[in-house]
Image (cartoon, helix red, strand yellow):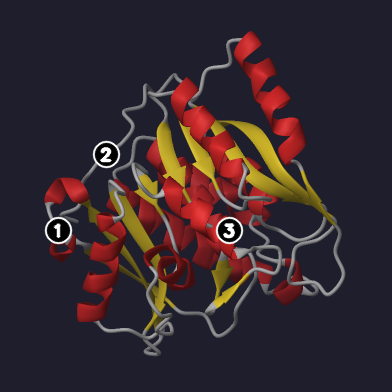
């Protein structure tokens, strides 16, 4: 792989500390219920910052939603009083537009921390039901300066203001999309989930350090004949875990893709798997092995 950008040089005896700024779902595997165990399996100390509380994720017909914005300033004030140290800030689903300033506060107070941004806003051309245009516009402010920006095509279209093209796009179009994301100010981009309808899923990795998007790396994984909720969160969390383990960017994206594929195979044996989400528990030891 030519894209050998390494973002974190880890001492083998050191456990990196990651603030995971995501929502918490009581039922359904996504966000913090994915980030905490996956990052832990990759050798990270995970410090959750809950952006919202859901009874279940939004693919279910009935769910409760509680925005935690009001409690977060005091939450972070307490961290500062205790001299909490962070090596990375990994953000995902947000409960309100005001929470972007919470993440930016973390960037200011922990300037040496990596900025890992999964701009969770939607999928398959549609925004998630709790999102608004104001929140999507605010999310875009996190792209500028992100050490890694990890959108799917729906999120890339929202961030760049382009029309959603569907999942099946060719190499030239991919290059254009990745360049547009780099132009937002992201230092590195992982564009995930391109489906060419040829039996494979592709992810693309590009770095501003290497010039333009023409230097991107294509990573191909076998496409399974079913879809599962929560794979994007599992992918982003395992990619972040690999980065914090000292793997380079392209290798981290490859590890994440293989981990998600293995977890999806395990998930198909579980009841109601398509609604509940990806069950990765039996594959956590595999991830630990991959990042060592």
Q: Position of residue 57 (x, y in %)?
A: 75, 62
Numbered mark located on residue 223 in the image:
none
Decide if residue 292 is in sight here: no
Disc 1 element: loop
Q: Residue at x 20, y 62 (%)?
A: 216
Answer whether labels 3 and 1 touch (C-beta < 8 Å): no
Above/below status of 241 relative to 2: above
Instruction: Point out the image quarter for the C terminus.
Output: top left
Q: Residue at x 40, y 80 (%)?
A: 163
Q: Residue at x 37, y 21 (%)?
A: 11
Disc 2 element: loop
Q: Is residue 212 left or right of residue 289?
A: left
Q: Residue at x 69, y 48 (%)?
A: 23
Q: Mark 1 vs mark 2: give the one in front.
A: 1
Whole-number angstrom distance, CA of label 1 to CA of label 2: 18 Å
Numbered mark located on residue 134 in the image:
3
Q: Which residue is mark 1?
A: 212
Image-quadrant location for residue 40: top right
Q: Which residue is mark 2?
A: 6
> Which of disc 1 and disc 3 is earlier in sequence?
3
Q: Answer few, some or many: residues within 10 Å of disc 3's Cα (few below 14, many 20 plus, some between 14 and 19).
A: few
Q: Position of residue 279 (x, y in %)?
A: 68, 61
Disc 3 element: helix
Q: Position of residue 7 (x, y in %)?
A: 30, 36
């Amino acid at each position: 792989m030519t894209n050998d950008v390494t973002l974190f040089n880890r001492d083998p005896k050191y456990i990196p500390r990651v603030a995971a700024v995501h929502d918490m779902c009581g039922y359904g595997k996504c966000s913090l219920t994915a980030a905490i165990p996956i990052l832990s399996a990759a050798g990270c100390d995970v410090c959750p910052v809950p952006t919202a509380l859901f009874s279940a994720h939004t693919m279910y017909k009935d769910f409760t939603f509680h925005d935690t914005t009001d409690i977060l300033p005091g939450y972070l004030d307490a961290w500062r009083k205790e001299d909490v140290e962070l090596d990375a800030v990994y953000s995902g689903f947000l409960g309100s537009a005001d929470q972007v300033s919470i993440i930016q506060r973390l960037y200011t107070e922990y300037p040496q921390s990596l900025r890992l941004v999964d701009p969770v806003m939607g999928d398959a051309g549609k925004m998630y039901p709790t999102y608004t245009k104001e929140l999507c516009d605010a999310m875009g402010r996190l792209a500028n300066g992100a050490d890694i920006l990890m959108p799917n095509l729906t999120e890339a279209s929202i961030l760049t203001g382009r029309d959603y093209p569907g999942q099946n796009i060719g190499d030239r179009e991919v290059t254009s999309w990745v360049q547009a994301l780099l132009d937002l100010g992201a230092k590195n981009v992982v564009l995930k989930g391109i489906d060419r309808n040829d039996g494979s899923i592709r992810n693309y990795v590009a770095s501003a350090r290497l010039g333009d998007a023409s230097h991107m790396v294509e990573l191909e994984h076998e496409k399974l004949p079913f879809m599962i909720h929560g794979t994007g969160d599992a992918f982003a969390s395992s990619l972040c875990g690999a980065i914090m383990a000292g793997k380079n960017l392209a290798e981290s994206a490859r590890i994440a893709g293989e981990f998600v594929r293995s977890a999806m195979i395990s998930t198909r044996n579980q009841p109601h798997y398509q609604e509940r989400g990806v069950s990765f528990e039996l594959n956590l030891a595999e991830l630990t092995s991959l990042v060592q």
